[in-house]
């Protein structure tokens, strides 16, 4: 069992979920609100957590997390937290459930609306040093939200914004690869490419942070070796362990900053229809962004190709396109249901996204519109 103290304390290994009661006691949580989603209730995975909690840990359960967390869901979960007298949270699921739990924890101790604390609205300066304590338990290997100091939420206005700051960091992360055994190939592929996007964008971000770059490069190497195995065999324990580690590494590293891949995917992920998976979006737009950034990253593409195990004669964007094809990612945004008429509006939102500031190459609305068109 590896106990890692980096940004937070992480319990990482097969079977780590059994440590949840111990970690609740360590944090002084006597009645947590479990934030999860309907899919994990339907497939019974939530029962793994509830069994571990047993009859000795009272709790409330909010299972209404949508595929992209919303302000409306936040209001409902926060109301349940207060009415049930909870004193902490467990975020159980993918990035959506963990992000929603983070937002609930923040709003327990902060006045106003969640939009007041969005990074692009100057929210970082408004964050206090405390939030309701949170244990984050991922059931996919993609977002790494369990070790991330931010959350992304879609407001009632339809705008998808990030809230970032120290109070958003979970107090504990329980990373149990057994929870991802049997994850369907499509979701394994999409979440794995999300982790790859985090690692790649962090590595080429122009900010100076060598430790983050080293972590990101290690994550790229694990994904290059293990993602296709995880997709082809959902019960490969070694592949699942390494993909969960790579996912966690991606989020550890992206404290350094992301880039245009995420700037493009965030607005599309806020659409009510079609409902688009964040990791799949990242995978689809990544080759176009890599071509756009090529002359602004020095020799970093060489290191990324080496980590992925790609030969020197293959360009990095082509390598990502080939990986997408082999693991069943859609060929373009059009295949995901995106229509050309929305691209100009999406480009405007992408230009204002907080990730745009740390892209290696400055990007304008016109640039983002062309990138969307290229990714169609």
Image (cartoon, rainbow, N blue to C red):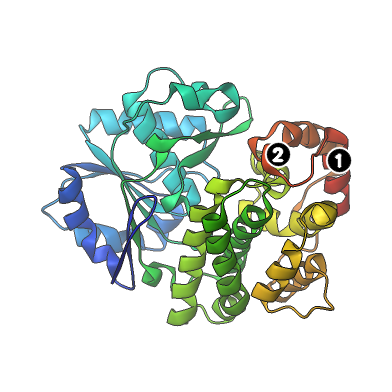
Figure check: 214 above or below 136: below
Between disc 1 and disc 2, whose residue precedes? 2
Figure check: 73 above or below 200: above
Left or right of 313? Residue 151 is left
How many C-alpha atoms fall within 10 Å of the one at disc 1: few (<14), some, or many (≥20)?
some
Describe the element under mark 2 as helix, strand or loop: helix
Figure check: 206 above or below 347: below
Describe the element under mark 1 as helix, strand or loop: helix
Identified at 43% across, 61% down, the residue is 139
Identified at 32% across, 33% down, the residue is 131
Location of residue 329 in the rendering, given as x and y in whole percent from the top left corner: 71, 66
Left or right of 354? Residue 48 is left
Residue at image mark 2: 356
| Residue 334 visible | no
Residue at image mark 1: 367
Location of residue 351 in the rendering, given as x and y in whole percent from the top left corner: 76, 34
Quadrant housing residue 83: top left
Q: Residue furthest left?
A: 56
The image quadrant where one finds the N terminus is bottom left
| Residue 189 visible | yes
Quadrant housing residue 130: top left
Q: Residue furthest top?
A: 112
Q: Nearer the viewer, residue 95 or 355?
A: 355
């Amino acid at each position: 069992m590896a106990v890692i103290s980096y940004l937070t304390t992480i319990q990482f290994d097969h079977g780590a979920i059994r440590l949840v009661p111990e970690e609740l006691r360590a944090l002084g949580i006597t009645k947590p609100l479990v934030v999860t989603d309907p899919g994990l209730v339907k497939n019974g995975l939530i029962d793994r957590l509830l069994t571990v909690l047993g009859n000795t840990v009272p709790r409330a359960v909010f299972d209404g997390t949508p595929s992209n967390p919303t302000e409306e869901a936040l209001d409902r979960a926060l109301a349940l937290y207060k009415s049930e007298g909870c004193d902490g949270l467990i975020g159980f699921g993918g990035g959506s459930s963990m992000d929603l739990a983070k937002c609930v924890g923040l709003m327990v101790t902060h006045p106003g609306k969640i939009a007041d604390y969005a990074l692009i609205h100057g929210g970082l300066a408004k964050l206090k040093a405390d939030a309701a304590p949170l244990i984050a338990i991922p059931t996919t290997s993609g977002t790494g939200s369990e070790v991330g100091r931010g959350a992304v939420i879609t407001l009632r206005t339809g705008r998808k914004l990030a809230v970032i700051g120290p109070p958003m960091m979970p107090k504990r992360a329980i990373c149990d690869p057994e929870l991802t055994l049997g994850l369907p190939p499509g979701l394994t592929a999409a979440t794995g490419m999300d982790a790859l996007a985090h690692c790649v964008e962090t590595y080429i971000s122009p900010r100076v942070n060598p430790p983050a770059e080293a972590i990101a490069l290690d994550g790229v190497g694990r994904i290059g070796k293990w993602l296709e195995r995880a997709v082809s065999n959902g019960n490969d324990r070694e592949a699942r362990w390494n993909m969960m580690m790579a996912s966690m590494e991606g989020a550890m590293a992206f404290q350094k900053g992301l880039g245009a891949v995420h700037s493009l995917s965030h607005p599309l992920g806020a659409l009510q229809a079609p409902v688009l998976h964040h990791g799949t979006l990242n995978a689809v737009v990544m080759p176009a962004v890599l071509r756009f950034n090529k002359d602004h990253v020095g020799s970093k593409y060489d290191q990324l190709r080496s980590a992925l195990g790609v030969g020197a004669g293959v360009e990095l964007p082509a390598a990502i396109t080939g990986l997408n094809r082999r693991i069943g990612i859609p060929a373009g945004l059009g295949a995901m249901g995106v229509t050309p008429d929305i691209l100009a509006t999406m480009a405007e939102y992408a230009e204002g996204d907080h990730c745009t500031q740390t892209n290696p190459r400055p990007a304008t609305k016109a640039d983002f519109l062309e990138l969307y068109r290229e990714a169609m």
